[in-house]
Amino acid sequence: MRRPTPLLFLVVILAGILMLREPRLAHVDDFFQSWFLAHAESELPVAPVTLIEISHNDFRSLPLLPPKGGRIQRTAPAANLARTISPLEYALFLQAAMEFQPAVIGLEPIVVWRAQDKDQEQVFLDQAMRVPKLLVGMQLGESGPRDVPNDDILSFSQVTGKRGGLAEYPGVSHRPDDDIRLISTPGFINLPNDRSDRIRTPMLFEYHGEIVPSFPLQAILLWLRTTPSDVKVELGRQILLPNGWKIPLLPDGTTMVNPIAAESVRHLTLNQLLLAAQEREAHRKPTLNLDYLRDQIILLRVADDPLQPPTGFATAIATIQDNAYIRRMYPIYGWLIVAGAAVLSWFLWRISKANFILLAIVVTAGYSLAALNFLSAYRLWLPMFLPLVLLWFLVVVRLATPDPATT
C-alpha cells in the first residue's frame, strides 16, 4: 500500500484556494446554478411589475396622426412600413398606460429619435409630462459630449466598504436629449463587462466618483417613493432600503436574482394595453381587466433594439419585490470543502480504483440532489464547481497512478 503523498495534499489545497479566490472561476458556478434553477420546483407570488415587450413589427400596424383634442389618433394599418419607433408611438404607449395610473413607467430603450422624427418630439413630451414617475434608460461609457453633470444624477450618500469591485465609468455614451432627461429619472442599463447574465444583475455603478443606481434599482426606489440619499449601501454586503428591505450585494455591485421570478412578472402585449385603454375611455366592459396596473411598475422593452441590453430587468425587480433572492452558502463552506478534499487525498491510496469511482458517482449524485433540494426549499445555493472539480481530479489521479506491485 502506498504512503500518503504530501505533494498531492498540497496540490489539492492550492487548487482549492485558486478556485475560491479567482472570480472568473467562481462565475463558472453560475452555469451550474442556471441549470439547477431551470429544474427547481419553486413558486412565487405575482409581483407588482408588468412587462410590455414589443418589436418594431408591432408598431407597423399602428401608423399615427398628430393628436386631436389632446389624444393621439390612429389611422388604418399601413401595408408596408419599415421604420424605427417614433415619438408618436412612444406617446401612444404612455397615453394608454396612464389610463391605469401606474406608480412608475420605465422605458428600457434609450429614447433617441431619428432626425426626421424630431418634429414629433413635442407630442411625446406632452404625454411624458403627465407621467408622475418616468424612468428612462441611459448608458454609461467613455467621457464625451453626452456626459451629464454629477449634480443632475441621483447618487448614494451613505456608502461604506471598498469600491474597487464596482464597474467604473467616466462618462455617458447614450442618453436621451435634455428635454426628455429633465422631466424623467435616468436608469443606467449597463451590464458588467458587457456580459449578459441570468443570475447576476447590476445594482450599482461608479460614475465620476459617485455611486449611482442601476435601472432596476432606480425603478424600485421610485416605486417606494424614496431617494438614494435615504438608502444605506454596504458595498460587498447589502443595500438597506428605508422600508427595511435588504438587497444582497456582491463585490462587483451586482445582486444574484432568481430567474424563477420571471414567472411572477405579468406580461402584456401592446395591443392588449391599447384595447383596454380604449375600452376604459369608452366606459365599455373590459375584454381584459387591467385594474391591477394601478400603483405598479410598468416596463416597456423593445425586443430588437440594438442599444438595449439582453437582460431581464423585470426579473430583477420582481426578485426584489418578492424577496426571492438566491443566496450562496457562507464563505466558510468553500474552505470546508477544500479541507475535506485534502483529507480525502491523504487516504486516497487506501481505496481501490473501482470503489473510488463508485464512491465519486454516489457523492456526485447525492450532492446534486442536495443542492437541488436546498435551492427549491430555501433558495440557498450549494456550490457545485468547487467540490466536483476537486473530487473528480482525485479520481483522475487515482486512475492514472498504478497500484504498487505486490510480492
Image (cartoon, rainbow, N blue to C red):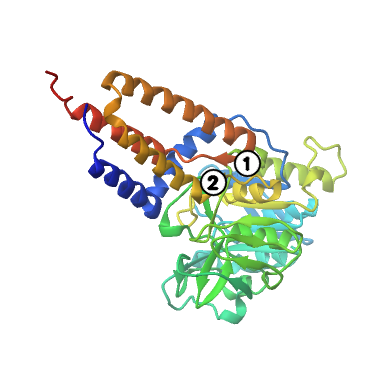
Of the pair 115 and 383, the residue shown nearer to us: 383
Q: Where is residue 32 shown, x and y percent of the image?
A: 44, 37
> Seen in the image, is 406 located left or right of residue 112?
left
Res 211 quadrant in image: bottom right
Q: Amino acid at mark 2?
A: Arg
* Identity of the residue drawn at 65% across and 41% down: 269
Q: Residue furthest front?
A: 407
- Observer-nearest of 51 and 153: 153
- In the rendered image, residue 98, in percent from the top left (x then y), is placed at 76, 55
Secondary structure of residue under mark 1: helix
Q: Is residue 107 visible?
A: no
Q: Is residue 328 visible?
A: yes
For disc 2, the marked residue is: 328
Q: Nearer the viewer, residue 3 or 271?
A: 3
Dot 1 alpha-carbon crowd within 10 angstroms: few under 14, some 14 to 19, many 20 or more: many
For the C terminus, the image quarter is: top left
**Residue 91 sits in quarter:** bottom right
Left or right of 292 in this view: 63: left
| Element under disc 2 | strand
Look at mark 1 in the image and give the residue it sits on.
Answer: 261
Q: Earlier in the sequence, mark 1 or mark 2?
A: 1
* Quadrant of the frame with the N terminus: top left
Q: Position of residue 397 (x, y in %)?
A: 24, 33
Image point (43%, 76%), residue name: 143
Callout 1–callout 2 Cβ contact below 8 Å: no
